[in-house]
Image (cartoon, rainbow, N blue to C red):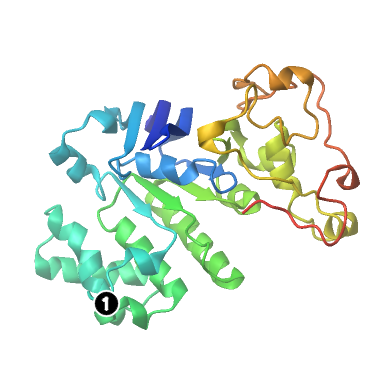
Amino acid sequence: MSTLEIKNLEVTYGSGAGAVPAVRGVDLTVAAGQKLGIAGESGCGKSTLALALLRLLPASARLSGEILLDGEDVLTMKWGRLRSVRWAGASIVFQGAMHSLNAVHRIGDQIAEPLLVHGQATPGAARRRVGELLEQVGLPAARADAYPHELSGGQRQRVMIAMALACDPQLIVADEPTTALDVMIQAQILRLIEELVAEKSISLLMISHDLAVLSDTCDRLAVMYAGRVVEEGPAAEVFAAASHPYAAALSSAFPRIGDAASRRAPRGLPGDPPDPAALPTGCTFHPRCPVAEAVCAEEDQVLRVAGAGRRAACVRVGAEPVPLPAPSRIAGAGSAKSSPSGD
């Protein structure tokens, strides 16, 4: 059984210049208890996708398609039903805990709020539940009386995870949950999320720029570019041997420990994702693709079978894999001074 099914999801934002497509025809499934990672550079539509799952986008956004949460379409839910699904059916861990938490309320009150709103506990029981949740995420129950500014960045992120777990949702969406944290705290938070998801059999959709993190944390990985999924498959396989040149470039941007060549000349990817208001013709990745063919500028590409449980939107899928050029042959890479432009 699937916890989440996304079918042909389209999200466009209204602007003075007309409709701007941010998510274009996305189809994804998160099975019960499964962990799906979403990767891509900034501007590829990852966060828009996450916010669309619970209709948290601004009024200027227009959505079409289907977002089925346990078979029920989020996009057609009445307001009362949608309110009951948020936190209880699915919850979100945002990337900026300091901006997501209310600075003038104690964290215990903020964790208790969804419990009280959904009628899952009396005030006294909610207080006890808050203590249990804080201890689950590695904080003393006594910290419930603290204000957000009295906690470190890692502690605030733990509070956000506690809030997300409060009503025992079936799905947690984690949008860059470790972006603002140092490397050691990032590892702790990721390990905590993994353990809690496994312990409670919760489905997880995690968004990150970091393919290495997603390959270690998630079962499956979907790579987005210009609002579309360009590759999907088992996380370790996509990271180690991507079928789409964009996914391969993202993976290659991470220097391998012990590999002097990749450390001195990482395979960067020059340029930026295209402006959603002015997408190129054909495959949207072709202007940056190091192995593009003439047909790529003329014909858009759809997801094709790229192996067992794998899909990729590239004209080369189904043919013999063609390795990316060496770092020195990719513009903007090939020297120690070059840096990947994946953020």
Q: How many marks?
A: 1
Quadrant of res 147:
bottom left
Q: Residues within 10 Å of mark 1 (few under 14, many from 20)?
A: many
Quadrant of res 82:
top left
Query: Is the C terminus in the top left, top right, bottom left or bottom right quadrant?
Result: bottom right
Q: Position of residue 169 (x, y in %)?
A: 30, 48
Residue assigned mark 1: 144
Q: Is residue 318 visible?
A: no
Q: Residue at the spot x=27%, y=44% of the render?
A: 89
Residue 153 in the figure: left or right of residue 149: right
* Image height of 131 relative to 276, above or below: below
69 vs 103, nearest the viewer: 103
Query: Is the N terminus in the top left, top right, bottom left or bottom right quadrant?
Result: top left
Residue 121 in the figure: left or right of residue 232: left
Residue 294 in the figure: left or right of residue 109: right
Q: Amino acid at mark 1?
A: Ala
